[in-house]
Amino acid sequence: MLAAQTMDIVWVTAGVGAFLLAAIYPLRHLRPSQKRIYVPAAIFIGAFLWGAFIAYSLSGGPLLYGAIILGLLVNASFVVKHTRVCEHCGAIVGLKRGANEVHACNPDDLLVNALSPQTEAGQFEAPPRGFKVTTAASGDLVIDYQTTGMGCLACFTSAWLAIWTVAAGYTTYDLVSHKPEDVSLSSMIMWVPLLPVAGWAAWYFFSVTTLTLSNDLLIARRRLGPIAREKRVARSAMTLIKTVKDGGQGGDSFHSWGLVVRGRKELRILSRQPQEQVLWLGRLLAKWSGLPLKDGGSPVYPKYETL
């Protein structure tokens, strides 16, 4: 009996954790206009599911169940009423009664704007979301980038991982309860597919690409914890900078672009990213190298060395 209760607790905890991960993580990849729809929807859905779980755990009739769910939805409406999404930076702001809805965006944005390349009109072009621009002690320009803006892909990946994790957890729980002799093989079959997908998702969404621009050298480094890849391209050896469309064709439903730099080899320093981010970095590298930024156009291209 105690073992069954323990497994119920583990099962509920895993389900709640998977739901929170699927609901919260896509936030950083959504535009402010998308967040203004997503945040209230997530709050209401979360309140409904929590109310349904409480009602399921209690013994009562439909009226009690409906009262519990309705009460939580009413509370959720107050949370939504006092929550705003900044239209500039996308930050989620909790408002106090009578407070001004305008808030100060991250002060680092001022530094980023000051270090951004100038457009042809002579105005500063602010970097899109995902970029952090600084200078090293040596005076070299340092650009950090983490995948952002791929909201649909983030939602799809989070939902897939959450659903598969819950399914694998439930299968393991069911086997432990009824067929303990089959736990090892069946559990492995359910959990093994998670490893490559979770590894790819972690590298794609959480790794940081750092570009260091000195007078004569481009150092491109992508890292995730202790794992890192680094490539160097001499400025004098660069002959081409171009954008390529690497997603959204054929069976691929997620539109994305990449940025390729040609030195001795062709290196794709950004892959499967939003067009805005790719174009901004491409213009900056074009200005630094003195080369024009070209459009690769066709999604059919040779396999580039990818960072």
Image (cartoon, rainbow, N blue to C red):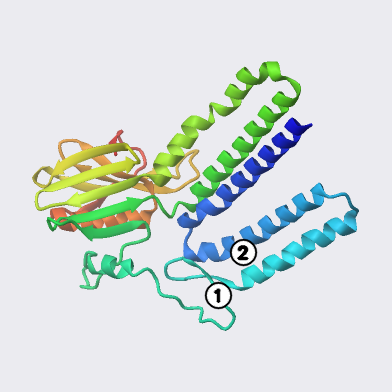
Residue beneath label 2, please? 40
Q: Answer left or right for 188 relative to 3.
A: left
Hey, which quadrant is residue 304 in on the image?
Answer: top left
Reply above or below: 45 against 168.
Answer: below
| Mark seen at residue 95 | 1
Reply above or below: 234 against 40.
Answer: above
The N terminus lies in which quarter of the figure? top right
Mark 1: secondary structure: loop
Amino acid type for the residue under numbered disc 1: Leu
User: In this orientation, does residue 244 appear?
Assistant: no
The CA distance from mark 2 to mark 1 is: 14 Å
The picture places residue 164, in percent across and down from the top left corner, at 60, 36
Hey, which quadrant is residue 143 in on the image?
Answer: bottom left
Q: Residue at x 61, y 19 (%)?
A: 184
Mark 2: secondary structure: helix
The picture places residue 87, in percent across and down from the top left corner, at 47, 71
The picture places residue 231, in percent across and down from the top left corner, at 21, 39
Q: Residue at x 45, y 40 (%)?
A: 201
Amino acid type for the residue under numbered disc 2: Pro
